[in-house]
Amino acid sequence: MPSVQIARYIISFSWLYHGIFPKLVHIAPHEKLMTASIGFSESMSYLITKSAGVGEVIFAMLLFVYYQSKVIIVLNIMALIGLLLFVVALQPQLLIEAFNPVTTNLPIIGLSLVLLNNLKAQPNN
């Protein structure tokens, strides 16, 4: 399987998984912690978290289909950097937890760069 397809599947899967399981199926404690640290009520935090889960699922599907779109890939990188900075600013202690945003976001950004490099290597770009 070509590395571009591997990157496509892993990036899409990551957004899909993080949208479904810690936000839609069951709200993970760290998800509650993040929205609570902004100061939202419990009901508003619930709504924001569920909405974020839906957004992540939609983005996963968009990325899976449009993985050759520079705009989608750049949005992916910007979102991952933004989410990482969000944790740094609001809950920096999460950065030393197992499977933290550093160990998940940075590798996905790296795979996104594989997709961007592939686009640059195509003759029509």
Image: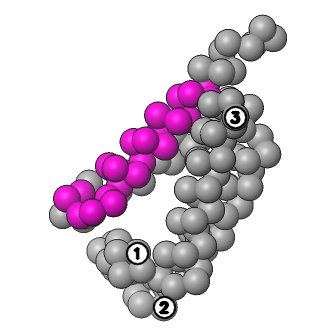
Residue 71, can we see it? no
Q: Which mark is residue 105?
A: none
Secondary structure, mark 3, is: loop
| Relative horizontal placement of residue 103, taking residue 49 as reference (left or right) | left
Q: Which mark is residue 43?
A: 2
Q: Is residue 63 part of the magenta span, yes or no?
A: no
Q: What is the x, y in percent for residue 83?
A: 42, 54
Tell me which label, 3 or 2, sits earlier in the chain: 3
Question: Which residue: 78% across, 8% down?
Answer: 123
Mark 3 or 2: in front is: 3
Q: On the rendered image, what quadrant is the N terminus found in? A: top right
Q: Quadrant of residue 51?
A: bottom right
- Report the colour scheme: one colour
Mark 2 or 1: in front is: 1
**Distance Cα–Cα, label 2 vs label 1:** 13 Å
| Relative horizontal placement of residue 55, taking residue 65 as reference (left or right) | left
Q: Which mark is residue 1?
A: 3
Question: Which residue: 59% across, 20% down?
Answer: 117
Tell me which label, 1 or 3, sits earlier in the chain: 3
Question: Which residue: 64% across, 51% down?
Answer: 12
**Distance Cα–Cα, label 1 vs label 3:** 34 Å
Q: Which mark is residue 31?
A: 1
Q: Quadrant of residue 96?
A: bottom left
Which residues make up the magenta segment?
95-116
